[in-house]
Amino acid sequence: MSFQSSTYSRTLQTSLTNKQYMLLALPIIFSQMTTPLLGAVDTAVVGQLPNPVFIGGVAVGSLIFNTLYWVLGFLRVSTSGFTSQAHGANNQVELMYSLLRPMLIAMVIGSLFVLFQEPIKWAALKIINPTSGVAHQAALYYDIRIWGAPFALMNYVILGWLIGSSHVKLTVYLQLGMNVLNILLDVLFVTSLNMGVAGVAIASLMAEVGVMLAGVFILVKMKLVDIRSIQLVKDIFERTVFIKMVKVNRDLFIRSICLLTVYTIFTSKGAQMGEVELAANAILFQLHFIMAYGLGGFGNASSILIGRAIGSNNRQLFSDTIKLSARWGAIAGILLSFLLVMGSSVIYPLFTSIDQVIECMVQYQGWLLLFPIVGFWGIILNGVFSGATEAAQIRNSLILSMALFIILVNLLTPAWGNHGLWLAFTLFTLSRSVVLGAYLTKL
């Protein structure tokens, strides 16, 4: 990392205040926390059905899409980065390219998902290895929702572009719109029309398509983009830029693969312990995702501010960002754990009406309470290193932590069962924080 002067963000004050930090972080946090709600709402609605197989099926199906899309999260990150640079330079042509280039990539990758949907489904179910009943419901969910892959990935690009061009509030509106639409359609298809798992999948598919179309409409209607600013279409495919995009995202892609591996092993091990444990773990993990995305809002805010600090050669802003991120991340982590303790009796029944599953969740909820406390620092540092474009450290921290998780899972689960599985995951989370914290001294 090096501090070099630039015109970008010179208007930022030297000292970052709590108010300035939170005005940036809160909209991002809110937007982040709505991201996993699509799967959470699906799980909650199907949880009202009388058989845990339905919960497990939707949980496994949601996991497949959560992890596939997580791997491609670099589309949002890179789009935001390139857009921020073009926006700061007031380069309208490059601003358009920063949207169109990743949009084309998203369309191609999403179409490949649809084209190769059968081998992807086979591999995912083979790895997770759920019971036959759960596998049948998961396949039903997957076969419908896979058609939304191109739209979901294009949503990533639109959201990244809006964040990079300082239209954070619009991302909140889009995410809220998707979840409200999903909830309404879930109620219609599942509760009113009794369409079961298929209804849940159709609702998610329609929500993803709807929000993508709404995003494009907003970009055009509000004149945030102007196709006329494009000079040469061939410049969209300019080789140097694509090479740069690959270099920036390579290590982030490896990071995502490591996370995918950990989450897949976790779900697979849980599935082998029975349908009730799988259903309980699935709901607890949905809550984990909501917490992680919420804390990730601080990480994203940190990434934006760290990038601006480096771009404007502002060491004070760099230091203030880390200090305020640590402070508010710790407060948020403790608050999330407290809210879960106080509200579990209300939250859990929202996800399922099956007493056996709720009792199982209560048995293992202590591990979930630890997650925001041991994990907030690693999530924030992930944003810090992303903003500094030092993704190799992020990659290394995930490789080391993943290796630790694999070792611990095989050592702990034979003797301690599901408690051993959650302990291994908790130590994996802690390891990410420790390793990145060690790298921070060299940043």
Image: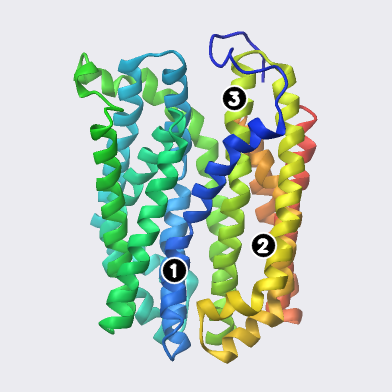
Number of marks in the image? 3
Q: Mark 3: which amino acid?
A: Gly
Whichever of callouts 3 and 2 sits on the residue coming sooner in the sequence is 3
Q: Is residue 84 above or below residue 129?
A: above
- The residue shown at (34%, 34%) is 102
Q: How far apart are the two marked residues, 2 and 1, measured between alpha carbons? A: 30 Å
Left or right: residue 186 versus residue 433 is left
Identify the secondary structure beneath mark 1. Answer: helix
**Which residue does the numbered mark 2 point to in the structure image?**
406
Pointer 3: what residue? 307
Task: Kindly identify the amino acid type of the residue bearing the numbered disc 1.
Answer: Val
Element type where label 3 sits in the image = helix
At x 25% / y 82%, what residue is drawn?
193
Q: Quadrant of residue 144?
A: bottom left
Q: List x then y, in percent, for residue 238.
A: 31, 19
Counting residues from the N terminus, which is met first, the one under dot 1 or under dot 3? 1
Crowd rating for badge 1 (residues with CA inside 10 Å; few <14, some 14–19, many 20+): many
Residue 420 visible? no
